[in-house]
């Protein structure tokens, strides 16, 4: 049974990803920061269905907490065979209104967290000469989002980190890929109105808005044994919004 760590798995895309890995027979490690009740509810839901799950609290933007989380994982189950760097925040602001704090918080939550978690996960994967890392980027990291410059910059950084790390770890049997979601209905997009969603769907070739399950399926695929010849890639899950 593989141990799959999903950061930010208390809600949204991360929670759905944890559900799908668990259904596939993996032991899921549900990381959360603030939403303890949601994380525990998900964990109970999986365990009562006979699936394997545990929760672990850590603010992944804090390197000491990430080290502690991996130390706990090592003690409980040896290490993470699959790492999904999903935790993230969003903020919509005019570029000229972004403060130093906004910038620092965005970069450390959405980009530095990926560095901290990969750094902590890799020694175990390298020892095993096997591993899968999937980072959750965003279409704005590929094409840039107006009024989301700091978010776009962080996600573009995730894409660069993914490509470079994939080159470095290929000979260790470790693949590193990104999924790049388009507009997905979660708490993160709850500020959008029905009219906004309708307009966005109209701009999307499939004519639809994405679901957390759409992204989860792509992540699970990139973590599968059959995807071993795919590394350093950015898999867009955007209904063709970005082609
Ligand atoms: P969401 O529903 O707002 O959930 C965000 C998750 O990230 C929560 O579980 C939250 O945990 C966790 N998180 C935030 N800061 C954290 C921290 N410092 N440490 C640990 N966990 C933290 O968002 P979502 O839509 O599922 O987004 C998931 C990922 O997809 C993000 O990286 C986001 O940028 C990306 N994405 C989303 C969309 C979209 O349209 N929704 C599009 C493109 C990319 P707690 O509540 O426990 O703090």
Image: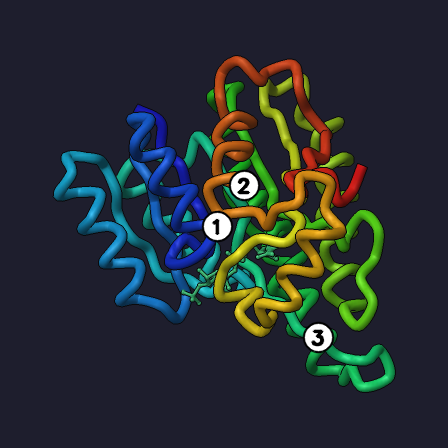
Question: Which quadrant of the view contains residue 33?
Answer: bottom left
What residue is drawn where x is 71% and y is 52%? 202
Disc number placed over residue 215 in the picture, else none = 2
| Disc 1 within 8 angstroms of ligand 1 (CB) | yes
158, above or below 41, in the image: above
Q: Earlier in the sequence, mark 3 or mark 1?
A: 1
Would residue 38 be found to the left or right of residue 88 on screen? left
Reply above or below: 74 against 200.
Answer: above
Tag 3, which secondary structure? Answer: loop
| CB atoms of marks 2 and 1 within 8 Å | yes
Badge 1: residue crowd in 10 Å (few <14, some 14–19, many ≥20)? many
SS state under label 2: helix
Quadrant of the snapshot with the N terminus: top left
Depth check, front residue: 132 or 143: 143
Q: Residue 180 or 131: which is nearer the viewer?
A: 180
Q: Position of residue 197 (x, y in %)?
A: 62, 61
Earlier in the chain: of badge 3 and badge 2, it is: 3
Which residue is painted at 41% across and 48% down in the image?
A: 70
């Amino acid at each position: 049974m593989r141990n799959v760590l999903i950061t930010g798995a208390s809600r949204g895309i991360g929670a759905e990803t944890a559900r799908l890995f668990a259904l596939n027979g993996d032991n899921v490690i549900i990381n959360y920061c603030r939403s303890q009740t949601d994380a525990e509810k998900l964990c109970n839901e999986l365990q009562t269905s006979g699936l394997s799950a545990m929760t672990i609290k850590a603010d992944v933007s804090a390197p000491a907490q990430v080290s502690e989380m991996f130390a706990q994982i090592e003690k409980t189950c040896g290490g993470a065979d699959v790492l999904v760097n999903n935790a993230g925040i969003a903020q919509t602001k005019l570029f000229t209104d972004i403060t130093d704090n906004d910038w620092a918080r965005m970069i450390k939550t959405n980009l530095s967290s990926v560095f901290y978690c990969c750094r902590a996960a890799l020694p175990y994967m390298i020892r095993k000469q096997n591993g899968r890392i999937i980072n959750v980027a965003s279409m704005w990291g590929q094409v840039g989002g107006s009024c989301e410059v700091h978010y776009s910059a962080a996600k573009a950084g995730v894409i660069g980190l993914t490509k470079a790390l994939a080159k470095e770890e290929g000979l260790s049997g470790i693949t590193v890929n990104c999924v790049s979601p388009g507009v997905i209905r979660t708490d993160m997009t709850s500020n959008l109105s029905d009219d906004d969603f309708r307009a966005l769907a109209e701009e999307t070739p499939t004519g639809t808005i994405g679901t957390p399950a759409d992204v989860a399926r792509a992540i699970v695929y990139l973590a599968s044994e059959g995807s071993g010849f795919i590394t350093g890639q950015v898999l867009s899950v955007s209904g063709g919004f970005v082609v």
